[in-house]
Image (cartoon, rainbow, N blue to C red):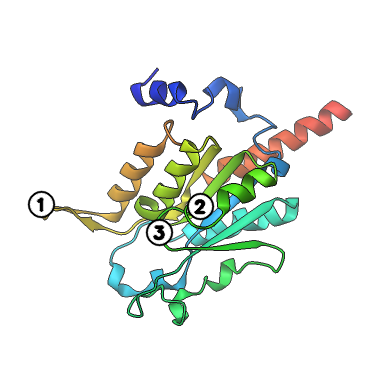
């Protein structure tokens, strides 16, 4: 067992792969939407500003929209997270248009929207209490950006004991420059962030894998009934 996976098991953060996968497919309990919430982090107009520079995964929002559509069709719990800054110069200042969520991922009236002021969606929002009071023990995370609020939220979700899944192609990163002046392109930042999270704080999956797992389970149930 890899060191980081072994540490995760010692902390009770992760289930074993055998508990999560059956013949390479997700088990039905993973996609039981009554106990699974889709959490979409900070998909705000602010990230369209050119100041952020190079970005990877231009299809991230399309994949988020696929997930959101699926959750709505199935009647699953959806939580929209929105970052708020008290700094009038910030793109995330509530009085600015850039504070708003993008049009393709606007919440419906019956969906939960929580505003946060720090990187983690669990701090100062009531998110943990909301999930537990609704019997939710599994969290699927998508949003922006991979190394910042998505990563922090994913880590905390795992630490709090939620079975956590991070959707790799429904997140994105911007290029970063380290303290030594070395610049890391957006794809490298994204990939390394996912590597630090996978099998320690979360199971990293793709949109296609996630949605196919549900369909496969549904087909198996129908066959069993037949």
Q: In which quadrant is the C terminus drawn? A: top right
State the residue lying farthest toward the top: 1
Q: Nearer the viewer, residue 61 or 122?
A: 122
State the residue lying farthest toward the left: 180
Q: In which quadrant is the N terminus drawn? A: top left
Quadrant position of residue 72:
bottom right
Classify mark 3: residues with Cα within 10 Å, few (<14), some (14-19) or many (20+).
Answer: some
Q: Secondary structure at mark 2?
A: strand
Residue 193, how many percent across, how many down? 34, 44
Res 91 label? none
Judged by depth in the image, the label closer to the viewer, 3 or 2, is: 3
Classify mark 2: residues with Cα within 10 Å, few (<14), some (14-19) or many (20+).
Answer: many
Determine whether, in the image, residue 175 is placed left or right of residue 110.
Answer: left
Res 118 label? 3
Q: Looking at the image, is mark 1 or mark 2 earlier in the sequence?
A: 2
Residues under labels 1 and 2: Cα distance? Answer: 30 Å
* Residue in the picture at 64% in, 43% down: 132
* Residue in the picture at 61% in, 29% down: 25
Res 142 label? 2
Q: Secondary structure at mark 1?
A: loop
Classify mark 1: residues with Cα within 10 Å, few (<14), some (14-19) or many (20+).
Answer: few
Q: Nearer the viewer, residue 221 or 123?
A: 123
Res 180 label? 1
Residues under labels 3 and 2: Cα distance? Answer: 17 Å
Q: Looking at the image, is mark 1 or mark 3 earlier in the sequence?
A: 3
Residue 40, how many percent across, how many down? 54, 56
Determine whether, in the image, residue 222 is placed left or right of residue 137.
Answer: right
Judged by depth in the image, the label closer to the viewer, 1 or 3, is: 3
Q: Looking at the image, is mark 3 or mark 2 earlier in the sequence?
A: 3
């Amino acid at each position: 067992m890899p060191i980081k996976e072994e540490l995760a098991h010692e902390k009770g953060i992760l289930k074993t792969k055998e508990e999560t996968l059956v013949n390479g497919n997700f088990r039905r309990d993973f996609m039981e939407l009554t106990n699974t919430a889709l959490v979409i982090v900070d998909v705000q107009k602010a990230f369209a500003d050119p100041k952020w520079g190079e970005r990877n995964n231009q299809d991230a929002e399309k994949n988020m929209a696929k997930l959101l559509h699926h959750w709505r069709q199935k009647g699953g719990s959806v939580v929209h997270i929105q970052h708020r800054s008290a700094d009038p110069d910030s793109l995330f200042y509530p009085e600015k248009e850039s504070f708003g969520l993008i049009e393709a991922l606007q919440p419906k009236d019956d969906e939960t929207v929580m505003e946060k002021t720090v990187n983690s969606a669990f701090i100062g929002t009531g998110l943990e209490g909301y999930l537990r009071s609704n019997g939710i023990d599994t969290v699927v995370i998508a949003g922006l950006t991979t190394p910042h609020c998505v990563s922090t939220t994913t880590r905390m979700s795992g630490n709090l004991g939620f079975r956590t899944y991070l959707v790799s192609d429904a997140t994105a990163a911007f290029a970063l420059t380290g303290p030594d002046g070395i610049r890391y392109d957006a794809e490298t930042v994204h990939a390394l962030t996912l590597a630090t999270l996978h099998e320690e704080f979360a199971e990293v999956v793709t949109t296609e894998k996630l949605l196919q797992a549900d369909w496969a389970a549904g087909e198996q149930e129908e066959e069993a009934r037949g």
